[in-house]
Image: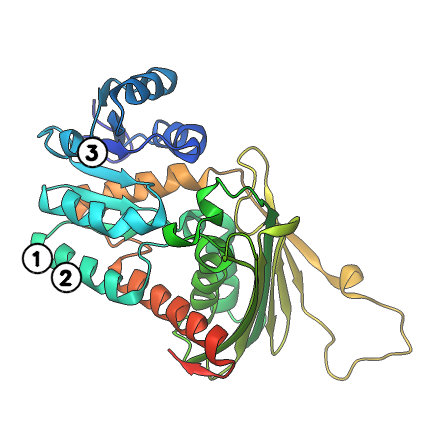
Amino acid sequence: MIDKNTGQKPVVWGVLGASHFALMAAIPAMQQAPLVELRALASRSLDKAKQAAASANVAHAYGSYEELLSDPEIEAIYNPLPNHLHVAWSIKAARAGKHVLCEKPIAMNAGEAQELARVAHETGKLIGEAFMVRHHPQWELVVNLIQSGRIGQVRAVQTAFSYSNSDLHNIRNQKDKGGGALYDIGGYAINTARLIFGKEPTRVAGMAARDPNSGCDSLTSAILDFGTGQANFVVGTQHVPYQRVHIFGTRGHLEVEIPFNPPHHRPCKIYVDDGFVGAPDFSVETSSDDRREVLTTPPANHYTRQWQAFSEAIRSGKPIQNDMHSAVANMRVIDAIFRALDSQRWEPV
């Protein structure tokens, strides 16, 4: 069946693994994208694969990842495996002739990401990192507002992102598998800060608290120096769930209400405060809430938009939002923050 909007044949996809996230969020979103034909799912257990495929209405189930990669009908692979398996299986997929969209973080360090980038170049296959947030209309609006000069020059970004999960059986709390706050959600703060400033940070500083049972960082803060401004963030895995991004410019301020996992069924809000014109008159009782304008973006499933965009790129050669150049850059920042946690000083990116 041809996608009526693009006039192109859908890309045939397969999924590595049968994780809860894949079944509950990723696969339903894939099935809503007109340019996606999700044909197969693989697990290391055939019974598990069959059960997952049946529950998700996927036609074919494979009892090993290798079987899926050897299927000549599969054109692209979604890799939501645990973090420490991302690079190895993405490389195997690319060398099997498949394009790859891999969950974040795409690697455990920048060296691994660079190895994957070399394989992408070697095979000619498209490999991207699944930072779905860049596909949401609210972030497109944020970029447009900044580029239009609405808030002047960006000087500071503040990000908070947290959830509560102390289950030691969960891979997010298993250090050897890439668990911890920085790997799991810190990448979002880094990726969006790089998007906001439109360039890469030169140095970072950071501090963290580690869970004594898992050894993972459960609370991490960092400062990213972009030269013309700074971004700071705090991410946590064992306190109240929350998320917000504030962007401060020379002439105004943006606030992104639900920056990273906004609901798909309702509009999202961006608050714009143009501040005072000239010197503030402190005799007038006015607050940012009084002044701010509320802008909304339409309901959207950024996962669906991500798979549609990636499939369009496969068919047409269009660039993708989070290519391997961006993925390596994001991992370099994560590496530098980990170094800063140990050294307790500024570390170069």
Q: Is residue 199 above or below residue 279?
A: above
Dot 2 alpha-carbon crowd within 10 angstroms: few under 14, some 14 to 19, many 20 or more: some
Which amino acid, mark 1? Glu
Q: Quadrant of residue 218?
A: bottom right
Left or right: residue 208 compared with residue 140: right
Q: Is residue 222 left or right of residue 96?
A: right
Query: Residue beneath label 3, please?
Result: 65
Q: Farthest residue to the front: give it.
A: 213
Q: Is residue 74 above or below residue 341?
A: above
Residue at image mark 1: 122
Residue 194 tag number: none
Q: Amino acid at mark 2?
A: Arg
Q: Name the element at disc 2.
A: helix
- Tell us which disc is closer to us: 3 or 2: 3
Q: Is residue 158 left or right of residue 289?
A: left
Who's the residue at 25% across and 66% down the image? 111
Q: Earlier in the sequence, mark 1 or mark 3?
A: 3
**Cα–Cα span, label 1 and label 3:** 22 Å
Q: Nearer the viewer, residue 90 or 180?
A: 180
Are dots 1 and 3 in contact, CB under 8 Å?
no
**Residue 40 spot, x, y in % from top left:** 23, 25
Quarter of the image with the C terminus is bottom left
Q: Mark 1 or mark 3, which is nearer to you? A: 3
Q: What residue lies at 25% left-to-right and 28% top-to-bottom?
A: 42
Mark 1–mark 2 contact, CB under 8 Å? yes
- Dot 3 falls on a residue whose secondary structure is helix
Say which element carries label 1: helix
